Image (cartoon, rainbow, N blue to C red):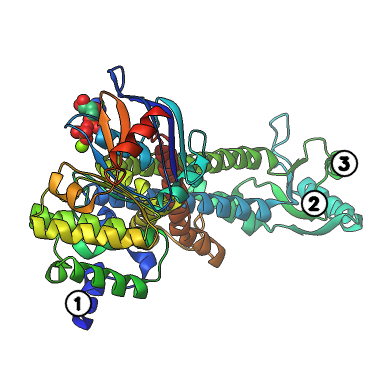
Amino acid sequence: MIKFEHVGLRYGVGPEVLSDVNFSLEPGSFHFLNGPSGAGKTSLMSLMYLGRKSTRGRVTMFGQSINDMPQEGLAKLRQKIGVVFQEFRLLPHLSAFDNVALPLRIIGTPEREIMSNVNELLEWVGLGDYKQSLPLTLSGGQQQRIAVARAVIARPKLLLADEPTGNLDDEMGFRLMNLFEQLNTMGTTIVIATHSQAIMEKFGHPRMMLGHGHLNIEDPKKNWLQRTMDGVF
Amino acid sequence: MALLAFQHDKKLGVADNSARYDLPLHNSAGSGFLLLLVALMSFLAMMTMTGAFAMHGVTSMWSSGLENQATIEIPARMSDGELRDKNELSALRDKLNGFLADQSYIESYEVMSREAVADLVSPWLGDDVNTAELPLPVLISVKLEDSSADILYRIRQNIRKYADDIRLDTHESWLSDILRLAGSLQFSAVIVTLIIGATTVIAIAGAVRSRMAEFRGDIELLHLMGASSTYISSQFQRHSVILSFKGSIIGIITGALALGLFSILSPSGAESLVPALHLGLFEWIILLLIPVAACLIAHITAKITVLRTLSELPL
Ligand SMILES: Nc1ncnc2c1ncn2[C@@H]1O[C@H](COP(=O)(O)OP(=O)(O)O)[C@@H](O)[C@H]1O
Ligand SMILES: [Mg+2]
């Protein structure tokens, strides 16, 4: 699904934010992305949602190398990726409904279908009464739920969420996590950047630990012996 | 639920998916400016083209009226300054009359009466001059089957036999000057129309670019969600085309009013050398195509501008 080989990223002439990142995620997997603030989680996400080119190394998505892919090919891949941005990035002049409907409109879903799917999802995330509200009139938590709804509405093959529960109380946070779990059981590959120890422990998925430009994957489900063996071989 | 759906449709203005915007282009500043500019450009294009049509009408009227037409003149005063004798004048007239009647390449001819010639000169002399005593030339207007140089040469050779100051005037020299002037005016009209088109292209491209800068973040987001360049550019295209359509309709309605006013104020009737500003069906169709041209320019310009700007995105 995703394969990074010796990937490095720097902004302009600054230092490398990511240096020699190597990992590969299987289809249908679920990972947390963890690391201190400024470690480069958002930067790594941007490489995965094809918002940026790596400055070195090879990125393979859905089995295709994206390094030299033409625009139309990239657009098609992006349609299979749902993203919850850390700062939401909702369109301020569109209602909650239209924001959530956007990915479906981009892929040309019939309006009747959009109507029922979007309404259902907005009800589910507790925003049934705010369908016509503009994002800026809503609270941070409500905006975050719109952002999550928008990311999942088109049933993406890959869901990338950058601290999607940061502005939510625990109950709504767990509720959204359950939504992600549900998507995952239907086959969506999921990567969630989070700081929340509570969430990582409750759901127990493998953790991609980012620090000093490098990435290590730790799986709490594997026991100490298995992890030691992984380290040896 | 049904109520909400209704509100939703109403808010978008149109329920159809293809008629909605993801970017608030319709209420962004600068739309009014572009509308006004397209209106002005359409108005100017209409005036310029009408001018060109009128010029074309003038030249075709003059050239068709005068083509194959010639005038033979037996001057009243001979080359040595002596007045020609009245009897000699009528003798020459009768000889020419006989000669012309025999020529197959002459379609028709008419010896102008003394009164008709006097009428021709009277505007220069004033009404109070007694034309009966005036030495007047004999004029014969001739319509030729064709006015090739060969035939004109033959006529000149023949009429000179009767008297060497008898002249054949074909109107060609002054007509060709006027036709050349009219031609260069029409050429200028074409250039001006092209400049108007180019100005419109530049203005629309500039407007689209500034609109894209204004919504850069939103466009990047659509791009990241996998919207194709075509999806994004179609929004700008629709916006520019609608604006240009409105603008050019305003422009040509104003233009039609101006032309109406102009034709009421301008002199009309047979005496005028310039035909009344009368546009035929063909001309009106061309003028009504101005909005179509404006929309086409808007569509293509917006599309190229957006695609170029999008291709500058990092990935
Ligand atoms: N657009 C950018 N331009 C320049 N530097 C950036 C940009 N985005 C992030 N950085 C830098 O990259 C580093 C990693 O940032 P980020 O990926 O946001 O980390 P995290 O999401 O883990 O907090 C930081 O030092 C940040 O200043
Ligand atoms: Mg971040």
Q: Which quadrant contains ligand 1?
A: top left
The relative height of residue B270 versus residue A38 in the rendered view (above or below) is: below
Q: Find numbered disc 1 in the image and state the secondary structure of the residue it sits on.
A: helix
**Residue at left 56%, top 63%?**
B282
Chain holding disc 3: B
Chain holding disc 1: B
* Left or right: where B12 falls relative to B156: left
Percent position of residue B55, x then y? 53, 49
- Whether pointer 3 and pointer 2 mark residues with C-beta atoms closer than 8 Å, the reply is no
Give the residue pinned by disc 1.
Answer: B4
If the image is split into quadrants, where does the C terminus of chain B sit?
Answer: top left
Give the residue pinned by disc 2.
Answer: B93
* Left or right: where A50 falls relative to B96: left
Q: Mark yes or no: residue A29 visible.
A: yes
Mark 1 and mark 3: span between their CA atoms?
Answer: 87 Å
Percent position of residue A210, x then y? 26, 31
Give me the disc on residue B150. Answer: 3
Taking depth in this image into account, of B199 and B176 the one nearest to the observer is: B199
Could you tell which of marks 2 and 1 lies nearer the N-terminus? 1
Percent position of residue A199, x then y? 17, 50
Give me the disc on residue B55. Answer: none
Q: Mark 1 near ligand 2 (CB under 8 Å)?
A: no
Q: Find numbered disc 3 in the image and state the secondary structure of the residue it sits on.
A: helix
Q: Of circles 1 and 3, which is in front?
A: 1
Q: Mark yes or no: residue B297 visible.
A: no
Q: Amino acid at mark 1?
A: Leu
How many C-alpha atoms fall within 10 Å of the one at disc 1: few (<14), some, or many (≥20)? few
**Residue at left 20%, top 47%?**
A200
Please check whether the numbered discs 3 and 2 fall on a single chain: yes
